[in-house]
Image (spheres, rainbow, N blue to C red):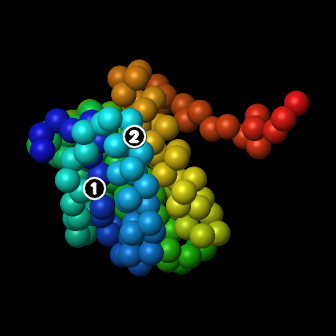
């Protein structure tokens, strides 16, 4: 599908283990969240030897409103199961890291999958609403203090 509202790409990056461990739980949550928001959902696909810059090529080829790249993080420091989600609003050749947002450390002892899905969807929603991403957009995270009753 060309020009979906949300396009998810899965890349092995530096840890295929992270992808195998986190994506089976995360992908259905993202799909459900897109459906609830009445967003068009591009067919997810997998890329081997993936790096973050591929977001630009995906933007040029598919013209999605928001691209989410789920990619394995560098193993070794904490766990080989850590996944990152890079997001960009309408990426294109020449888009830099300054125009991307990142949610990292997605794993059992880091950011739980359900929390990651909520954060990804909220950030994608904000990108669509404000028509921008990266340094021009700050993730709005509700803290425990904000959620606590007065």
Q: Position of residue 98 (x, y in %)?
A: 41, 36
Circles 2 and 1, Cβ within 8 Å, touching? The answer is: no
Label 2 neighbourhood size at 10 Å, few (<14), some (14-19), many (20+)? Answer: few
Classify residue 22 by image quadrant.
bottom left
What element does badge 1 sit on? strand
Instruction: Give the residue at mark 1.
Output: 9
Can you give x and y, in whole percent of width and height, for residue 12 in the image?
32, 69
Q: Residue at x 30, y 61 (%)?
A: 10
Quarter of the image with the C terminus in it: top right
The x and y percentages for residue 78 are 60, 73
Q: Residue visible at 52% across and 47% down?
A: 118
Q: Position of residue 100 (x, y in %)?
A: 39, 40
- Left or right of 134 in this view: 3: left
Seen as rendered, the residue at the extreme right is 150
Q: Which residue is mark 2?
A: 36
Residue 96 shows up from this direction: no
Look at 36% across and 28% down and name the residue there. 128
Q: Above or below — where is 10 with respect to 43?
A: below
Nearer-the-camera pick, 12 or 53: 12
Q: Does the rendering let one see residue 104?
A: yes
Of circles 2 and 1, the one toward us is: 2
- Which quadrant is home to the N terminus? top left
- Indicate the secondary structure of the residue bearing disc 2: helix
Farthest top residue in view = 130
Q: Earlier in the sequence, mark 2 or mark 1?
A: 1
Q: Residues within 10 Å of mark 1 (few under 14, many from 20)?
A: many
Report whether 83 appears left or right of 142: left
**Distance of label 2 from label 1 (alpha carbons):** 20 Å
Residue at image position (47%, 37%) is: 123
Closest to the observer, 17 or 14: 17
């Amino acid at each position: 599908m060309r020009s979906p509202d949300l396009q998810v790409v899965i890349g092995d990056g530096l840890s295929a283990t992270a992808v195998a461990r986190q994506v089976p739980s995360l992908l259905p949550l993202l799909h459900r969240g897109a459906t609830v928001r009445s967003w068009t959902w591009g067919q997810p696909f997998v890329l081997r030897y993936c790096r973050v810059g591929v977001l630009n090529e995906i933007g040029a080829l598919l013209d999605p409103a928001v691209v989410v790249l789920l990619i394995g993080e560098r193993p070794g420091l904490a766990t080989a199961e850590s996944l990152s989600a890079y997001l960009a609003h309408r990426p294109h050749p020449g888009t830099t890291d300054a125009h991307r947002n990142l949610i990292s450390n997605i794993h059992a002892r880091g950011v739980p999958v359900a929390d990651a899905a909520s954060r990804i969807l909220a950030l994608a929603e904000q990108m669509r609403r404000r028509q921008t991403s990266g340094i021009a957009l700050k993730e709005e995270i509700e803290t425990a203090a904000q959620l606590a009753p007065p």
